Amino acid sequence: MAKPLLTRNNDLIVATAKGKVIKLTISGVKLFELQIDGPIFNSPVEENGEFLVMNVKGKLTRIDNEGKVTGRSTVSKWTCFAPMKNALVSDEKGNIYRIDNKEENCKSKLFSKRKKKIVKELLAFSSFFVALSTDGVLEILDQDGNCSGSWNFGAECWSSLGALLKNDDFYVFIGSRDDQLTCLRLFTKNSQQS
């Protein structure tokens, strides 16, 4: 089972390996249940009032608040365990795709073609995105998917990023396979001037 999503309304969206998508209240009352193509290992995400669920075959399903499927599209055939955040999704080859297209049966647009290993985490920071690959490379990508900076941890990273926004500074915490914890301070032009 994928990590459940706690929605903005404090409901839970649960996606199972067998392709069931279930919406529950926080007290456990079932609001809807539907079956889509599985298996599902990726955690669902909430975006613009819809829930996005992607199976391991790269099929993305959009579901409204009532449990109705509002669209389906194909991302990539390599999406097992790929993170979905901020209208971006990665595949196991390290490529990042935009998932903002709501047209039925449409292929998602390639955002950043990369030669890195699996992208473990995607975060938004100001007008940039932070992508962490399992090979221990963190990249800062601009709105067009170009690399604006990077950091190599020197060891594989399989843990998720921790993030903290304080004033205009964005702190990222990463644990690597060699038991090192690193904190990076990313800052905007505004925070550089102060």
Image (cartoon, rainbow, N blue to C red):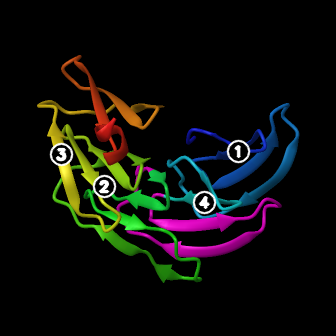
Tell me where the magenta segment starts and ends, as one range: 56-83
Q: Sequence-wise, which precedes: disc 2 or disc 1? A: 1
Q: Find the distance from the CA under tag 2 to the CA under tag 4.
A: 19 Å
Residue tagged by mark 4? Answer: 52
Residue tagged by mark 3? Answer: 150
Q: Label 3 amino acid? A: Ser
Residue tagged by mark 1? Answer: 7
Q: Secondary structure at mark 2?
A: loop
Q: Is residue 78 magenta?
A: yes
Q: Secondary structure at mark 1?
A: loop
Q: How many other residues sit within 10 Å of disc 4, few (<14), some (14-19) or many (≥20)? A: many
Instruction: Characterize the magenta stretch by its predominant secondary structure.
Output: loop
Q: Label 1 amino acid? A: Thr
Q: Label 4 amino acid? A: Leu
Image x and y of residue 58, in percent: 45, 65
Q: State which mark lies toward you, 2 or 1.
A: 1
For image coordinates 21% across by 55% down, the residue present is: 148
Image x and y of residue 87, in percent: 49, 61
Which picture quadrant has residue 48? Answer: bottom right
